[in-house]
Image (cartoon, rainbow, N blue to C red):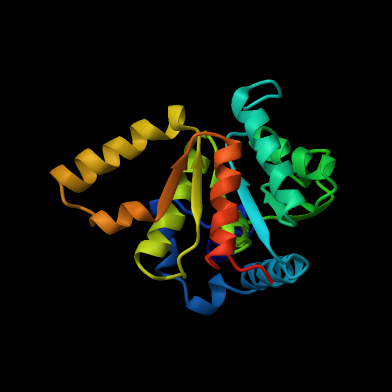
Amino acid sequence: MKKKLIKEIHKSGQICLPAATIGKLMNLPPERVGGMRLTRITQEFARGFHFLRNYGKSATFFGSARCVAGDKHYEEAKKLASLLSKDDFAVITGGGPGIMEAANKGANEAGGQSAGINIQFDHTQNVNPYVKESISFHYFFARKVMLAFASEVYIFFAGGFGTLDEFFELITLIQTRKIDPIPIILVGKDYWAPLLKWIEKDVYEKRSNIDKEDMKIYRLVKDANEAARVIKKLVKKDNIRTA
């Protein structure tokens, strides 16, 4: 029974487990749970940090994988990536379609560095054609750590649960001082303004669940041009590491 359980966990490759499985694990000695899986996790982190050493000043883009060329958010992401590439930023994304593809495409066409940190599904990689250099991860959480520690500025376009998850995790890390303050730019008032209004009116004013200063962690901008201007000002003020 124990051997079968450990084999199933290794095969699944997931960090999140059902309650029943966790209950079974509680009855196993710790040395039986680690082993090969722990080694693989360690190797993924080592490979990831080694990969990121190739990039100096970088900007990470987040956004929907469902966005397509011609959509205004896609075109704005492409434009911003191009503008930042011309200012010597490396552009880093999750390597997939949608906003990620748009950002990689903008960087690629501008002659800049265009990197992808992607996830592996069933031994296949879904990397968009505009990624110049990529690294793949088996574990979602390892990839997430790499994306969260890859850059000097983090840019969020309209997206789904994954995008929102990354946004809230980053602002929580900054709020709790687990990482140094990092510029977080939200592009697209039509998408982000309702969420930020809810945070301000309900989370802050009505519930007092955050401090007023916490809402300064992120900055909302209208479009790519405004985002580029804000980032350029941050560089001049030394709020963004440039070397």
Q: Nearer the viewer, residue 206 or 41?
A: 206
Q: Residue furthest left?
A: 206
In this view, the residue in front, 209 or 161, is 209
Where residue 157 sits: x, y (%)? 55, 37
Which one is nearer the viewer's eye here, 163 or 4?
163
Front-most of residues 36 and 166: 166
Left or right, residue 25 beside residue 199: right
Left or right placement of residue 161 versus residue 39 in this view: left
Q: Is residue 172 above or below residue 164?
A: below
Q: Image point 74% across, 68% down: which residue?
A: 47
Question: Which residue is most to the top?
Answer: 70
Give residue 21's quadrant in the image. bottom left
Residue 182, horizontal then vertical, whole percent: 50, 62
Q: x, y (%) of residue 207?
A: 15, 46
Question: Residue shown at 72%/54% (left/top)?
Answer: 87
Res. 118 in view: no
Residue found at x 69% / y 72%: 243
Q: Is residue 109 above or below residue 6?
A: above
